[in-house]
Amino acid sequence: MKSLCLMSALFTIALPAVAQNPIAELAGSTYHEKVIYAVYDLRGANLNVEAIESAVLDAVKLYARNARVQQGIPPSPYPATPAHITIGRRPQGGPMPECAGELFSIDGFDTSMAKYGESTYHRACLFPYQGGYRVNYFAIFGMQSGAGNRNPNVLAAMLGRAMAGAVGMGNSSNFINKTLERMEGNLKEQGVEARLVQLHPKELEGRVVVADDLPPPVVAAAPAQPVAQPVQLVSAPQLVPMGSGGLVQQNLPPELARMREEALRSHQATKQPPPKANPQGTEMSASDARKELTAMGLQYYNQDQFVAAIRRGDTLAVDLYLAGGGIDLNAGGAGKTPLAIADSANQQAIAGMLRKRGAQ
């Protein structure tokens, strides 16, 4: 096949769809996520790269006002087939769309609707090849919902989305399609023909995908070093249960991770299931405690999450951390022990739990 056919394999799992029925979302707190990926082919080896950069930057800044431009190190000579966005991981965990061999990359956050529980991350990269250039665009939209959310604006936003949906509007993920529309228009004004050769999801109003006539890249039989995988690895982040049937993504860019943590705290504040006692009624095993923490979206060995649970008075989480045995009882950061933090926060029940375990 001449087409790269990436879109048939790009997203090997179904990401949680953005809910269309806000009444079903009233209970608890839910975090939704949506991913959009597009590739534009720009034919012509002598195109003006600065004009392309200006067109893409203007489109990203339509909503992501804090956009950032970085110049890359392109290959020399240019390859016969273009590179593409890959999914890398931050040192502390979490996927991130990355570019290698690009002429430039542009990224930014749209936080215009953050106070209503909506945020979008944009990233675009320009990859050269012998016959022209390719713009890869990747966006992650995150949205909170549920009356149990601590953010009082979330419920108002849900009702607003319901009313907007009745007239065909919906949430701010629609801004992503408008960004693509702006990019296409800007490139056309620069005299550059932009052919949309890949798109996920395929059903975006006004976007028309054409056949990709570039041959697929040659894959080495046994590469000497592990190579970055194409965009299908967006399915790699773990999904863990939260609330009543809800799913949240555990590894996210910083702004979306913050939204996920807020949703998790809201869920814990409204419904905290009791830890599972074993049949003898004795203390929970370390293995069971770690499973419980994982089910809550927490890491049994994460000292920062342990201290955060102490500060907010989350006795359930603290008890599970103590039973799990993966944290240091006397390391709290900023010169304070977990016990000192509990005392200063007037969390006497937790302070008693820590003293019982021998914390100092």
Image (cartoon, grey):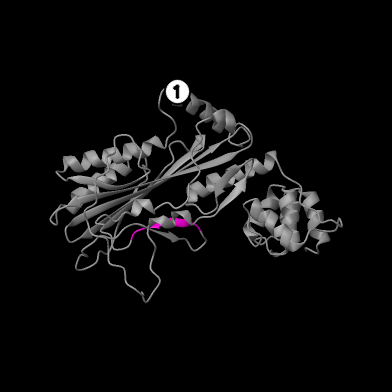
Q: Is residue 274 highlighted in magenta?
A: no
From the viewer's perspective, is residue 24 above or below residue 313? above
The answer to which of 262 and 11 lies nearer the viewer is 11
Nearer to the camera, 166 or 257: 166
Residue drawn where x is 51% and y is 60% of the image: 93
Residue 324 position in % (x across, y down)? 72, 61
Residue closest to the far left: 46
Rendering coords of residue 197 (x, y %): 26, 48
Secondary structure, mark 1, is helix
Name the residue type under label 1.
Ala
Rendered position, 163 above or below 341: above
Where does the image place residue 59, in percent across and percent down from the top left?
Answer: 29, 42
Q: Which residue is mark 1?
A: 166
For the record, the magenta segment spans 94-99
Q: Is residue 170 left or right of residue 26?
A: left
Q: Quadrant of the N terminus?
A: bottom left
Is 238 or 323 nearer to us in this picture? Answer: 238
Judging depth in this view, the residue of 328 and 265 nearest the camera is 265
Image quadrant in which the C terminus is located: bottom right
Position of 65 with respect to 128 (left or right) is: right
Would residue 292 be found to the left or right of residue 59 on screen?
right
Name the residue at 37% across, 51% down: 8
Q: Main secondary structure of the magenta part?
A: strand
Q: Is residue 302 left or right of residue 157?
A: right
